[in-house]
Amino acid sequence: MNTDIVQEYFNYIENSLYQYFRILLGNDYEKKFVKPFVDKYMAVRYYNNTIYLKDTNFVDRMSKEINLVAKESIKENLDKEETIKNICALIGYILYFDDCLKYKDLTGLIDTLFTDEIITIKRDDELKAEFTNFINGFIDKKKTFFKLFNTSDFEMVEKKLKKKVYKEDINYTFEVSKMYSDYAKDKAFNTGIIAEDKMYVLYLMIVNKILKNAIDLDFTKYYIADFPQSLFAKTKKTMKYLKLMDNELVKEHFSVQISYDTYKSNRKLIDSYINMGYNFALEIDSSYDEDLSGLVLFQYIIIRTDSKAYDLIMDNADNIKSTIIRV
């Protein structure tokens, strides 16, 4: 599996959509006519990239976006109007097969597609059998994908920081010999290489959670997790961790937390990661030197209400523009 696991999932969905249209359209299939619909579907379905955000109903948003694509395509290709209308209508069934809309019975849903008078496709048993096998494989592979993340050794611990923003941590659930004290076990788990490696597991779990949220059409939740200071001395390992987040959906919904002291010690490097699109949450600590200019780079500013810098930060909140989290 690639480190960009979300993109790997999206690539599978996208390739499957082309196969979906290839099977159903038969000789009428031309990728150049299908591509604008697939691109728009992926953008709206998985990135919530739409001009109709005020429409709370996802199906309405998708329908409006797809209809815009259809109108533009027909305008440019009048001789392919029937094919384009078919593509547009078939998107409606993808919403069921791709977990946007619920259905009671897959066989019944496929029967409905093959008897839908709005759609012009071959209606023979051979094509129906081929399509049924394809859809069953599509659904099964999506389920199998998420089994890769199942683990009984670790669990996420979640703390709500503010509305729709959560701090994530990780605990081990596996048995450790009773000869070790709780202090020894916690120290081993939270220091050195193990402390770094456990965060990789946590990031995988968060990325998985963000992907599942998108599949459930929930784009409202945002997550923060600590980023070990020791990683900044290990460029290759740092990039390995950041690569887990190297997807626009994940980047938007996931920030790693560092202290101001860590930022001062690694400013050039962290600024470069921010310029690459990765989001950081900055915790204001006792080393903060009242420099406001650099704070605008951060997705979140985390500050204790008893901090000496609290009034300064709050008085300049509008200029900082970052989301301020008070703890």
Image: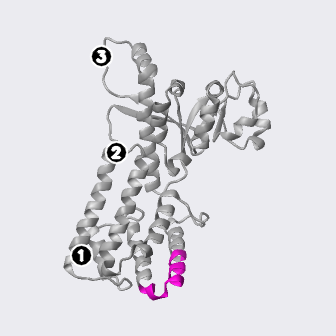
Q: Residues within 10 Å of mark 3 (few under 14, many from 20)?
A: few
Label drawn at residue 5: none
Give the distance between the C-alpha atoms of the residues marked 1 and 2, in whole angstroms.
32 Å
Q: Are marks 3 and 1 in contact (CB under 8 Å)?
A: no
Q: Please report whichever mark, 3 or 1, sits nearer to the chain's N-terminal start.
A: 1
* Residue 154 is inside the magenta segment: no
Q: Quadrant of residue 301?
A: top right
Quadrant, the C terminus: top right
Q: Closer to us: mark 3 or mark 2?
A: 2
Range covered by the magenta-colored residues: 68-82
Label drawn at residue 128: 1
Is residue 49 something one can see in this rendering? yes
* Residue 71 is inside the magenta segment: yes
Give the distance between the C-alpha atoms of the residues marked 3 and 2, in whole angstroms.
33 Å
Q: Which residue is mark 3?
A: 177
Query: Which residue sits at x=64%, y=30%?
Result: 267
SS at mark 1 in the image:
helix
The residue positioned farthest toward the bottom in the image shown: 79
Q: Amino acid at mark 3?
A: Ser
Q: Amino acid at mark 2?
A: Met
The vertical placement of 8 against 259, above or below, is below
Is residue 323 something one can see in this rendering? no
Expressed as whole percent of the image width and height from the top left, the position of residue 123 reads 26, 82
Q: How many marks?
A: 3
Q: Closer to us: mark 1 or mark 2?
A: 2
Q: Which residue is mark 2?
A: 1
Query: Position of 304 compared to 239: left or right?
Result: right
